[in-house]
Image (tube, grey):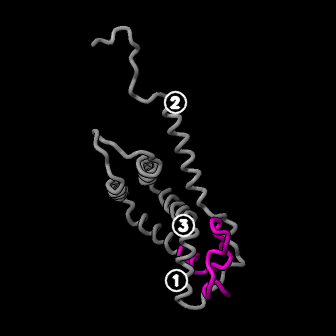
Amino acid sequence: MTNYGTIPTSSTPGPSANIEYLSRAKERIKEGLGARRPWKLMFNFHSINFPGNLSEAITRVRTNVAYFRMNYAMIVLLILFLSLLWHPISLLVFVAMMAAWLFLYFLRDEPLVVFRRTIDDRVVLVVLGVLTILFLLLTDATTNILVSLLIGAVVVLVHASFRRTDDLYDEESGEGLISGPSSSS
């Protein structure tokens, strides 16, 4: 059967598909940033005090890391970014890998297909992780990166252990996030 006189259709996505992808990406970024808690709540000076004992400190760290995880991730990434300012090649690699993570892992709606084969998310996660570490190690900023990640972890742990949890609010249930002995004092 011949198809004379028919208008051929293209199977490649047109500009509208690209615009739709970008708008979906924008929405997913907004949703991800929507998980960020208000900075005023995070740095409320009235909620800072020393934990009474080690178990209270551990409970506070668990609760605060779960509650402020997006804020803490932004702080660690900011510290890493600032430490790479004196290593421009590492900074470029970091930005390129962050873009790869965004488009190949975080902003994907459909499974990744390469040569007509569907790639599992765990494979994408492992490959991107290994490539990120490998490329950053190849830029000779290993010590700088490890020290900045250690500083970020210390900042997060100090804040999470000193910040009380009695004023944290769970929007979904409409109740306080935690109640019990660790929320007092």
The C terminus is located in which quarter? bottom right
Q: Residue 130: x, y in percent?
A: 32, 58
Magenta residues, start to end: 156-185
Question: Which residue has dot 2 on it?
Answer: 16
User: Which quadrant of the figure has residue 161?
Assistant: bottom right
Would you name the residue on which mark 1 appears?
A: 58
**In the rendered view, does 155 fall on the left or right side of 43?**
left
In the rendering, at what x and y percent does residue 175 appear?
67, 73
Q: Quadrant of the N terminus?
A: top left
| Element at label 2 | helix
Packing grade of label 1 (10 A; few <14, some 14-19, many >=20) is: some
Q: Which residue matches tag 3?
A: 69
Looking at the image, tell me whether mark 1 or mark 2 is earlier in sequence order: 2
Q: Is residue 98 in view from this perspective? A: no
Element assignment for label 1: helix
Q: Are marks 2 and 3 in contact (CB under 8 Å)?
A: no
Q: For marks 1 and 2, give the one nearer the viewer.
A: 2
At horizontal 39% and vertical 60% (from top left) the residue drawn is 141
- What distance separates the C-alpha of mark 2 from that of mark 3? 35 Å
The kind of residue tagged 1 is Ile
Q: Residue at x 68, y 76 (%)?
A: 167
Q: Secondary structure at mark 3?
A: helix
- Percent of width and height locating residue 18: 49, 34
Report, in whole angstroms, how far the alpha carbon at label 1 lies from the one at label 2: 50 Å
